Amino acid sequence: MDDTDHALFPRFSAELVATALKDTPVVMVTGPRQCGKTTLVRDLVAGNREFITLDDDTVLAAAHSDPTGFVRALDRTTIDEVQRVPDLLRVIKKSVDDDRRAGRFLLTGSANILTLPQVSESLAGRMEIVSLLPLSRAEIRGKKPGFLKAAFDSKLGKPAEPMIGKDLVQAVLTGGYPEMLRREDPKRARHGRGITQEPSCSGMYAKLPTWKSLIKCQGCCKFSPTTLAG
């Protein structure tokens, strides 16, 4: 279970989740491990609804042994790490079909849960998905970005002070995982390797081009961001 200091790093996605709970029976927050999903949902509805995590072995065993009975006893509940018992999604669909009140289930799951047939087949039209990524620079700074709004309002002001030199290098190497931001430099590198070795991340990194291939590409064609995207 990922545990982020939400008070230190308020998440802009919290507003999206809160809004979705007002008009949608099921809301799912997805994203890589350790990006702050658990803390976001737990803090967002603290004291207002039951919180259950499938990281608890006793709870996990109960959900596996009797998914129908497990869900029958729940209402206005947050279920953390739902990807650990995919059969719950089928039962939640039946429960929601019988009672379509908004905000009945708030779920969290790893990014790859969206590839499971149970999700697309069971909860289509019944669920809103909010994707949570690691912290953005604006979230780390605690300042909500206003560039797009200002641009559409034709009120562009003086640009913020650019990040250059060592500050830029440090920001890129640290990234946006909350746990990385709390660690000292030597421990940060080891923790970063652990994150990229997660099954959900390893496949993604395997698809990235190597520096050697990029250099070769640069020698035979015009190098641009479009080249990387392709």
Image (tube, rainbow, N blue to C red):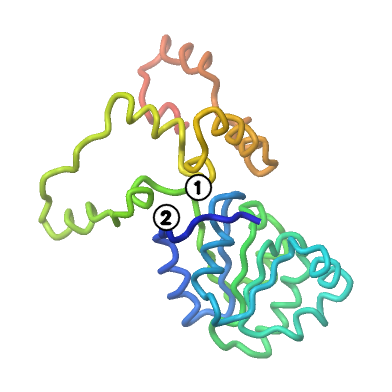
Which residue is pictured at 46% across the width and 38% down the height? Answer: 175
As rendered, which of 163 and 25 lies closer to the eye? 163
Label 1 neighbour load within 10 Å: few <14, some 14-19, many 20+: many
Which residue is pictured at 50% across the width and 78% down the height? Answer: 21
Which quarter of the rendered picture does the N terminus lie within? bottom right
Q: Amino acid at mark 2?
A: Phe
Instruction: Say whether residue 8 is left or right of residue 61.
Output: left
Kindly check if marks 1 and 2 are in contact, taking CB atoms under 8 A apart as contact.
Answer: yes
Residue 93 has which mark? none
Seen in the picture, residue 97 relative to 66 is either above or below; the reply is: below
Between the residue at mark 1 and the residue at mark 2, the CA separation in whole angstroms equals 8 Å
| Residue of label 2 | 9
Label 2 neighbour load within 10 Å: few <14, some 14-19, many 20+: some
Instruction: Say whether residue 43 is left or right of residue 151.
Output: right
Instruction: Say whether residue 162 is left or right of residue 188.
Output: left
As rendered, which of 220 and 184 lies closer to the eye? 184
Q: Amino acid at mark 1?
A: Pro
Seen in the picture, residue 220 relative to 16 is either above or below; the reply is: above
Q: Give the quarter of the image for residue 79.
A: bottom right
Instruction: Say whether residue 12 is left or right of residue 23.
Output: left
Residue 68 point in image, percent of width and height: 81, 80
Q: Give the quarter of the image for residue 195.
A: top right
Residue 49 point in image, percent of width and height: 59, 81
Which residue is pictured at 65% across the width and 36% down the height? Answer: 194
Callout 2: helix, strand or loop?
Answer: loop
Residue 145 point in image, percent of width and height: 28, 54
| Residue of label 1 | 178
Callout 1: helix, strand or loop?
Answer: helix
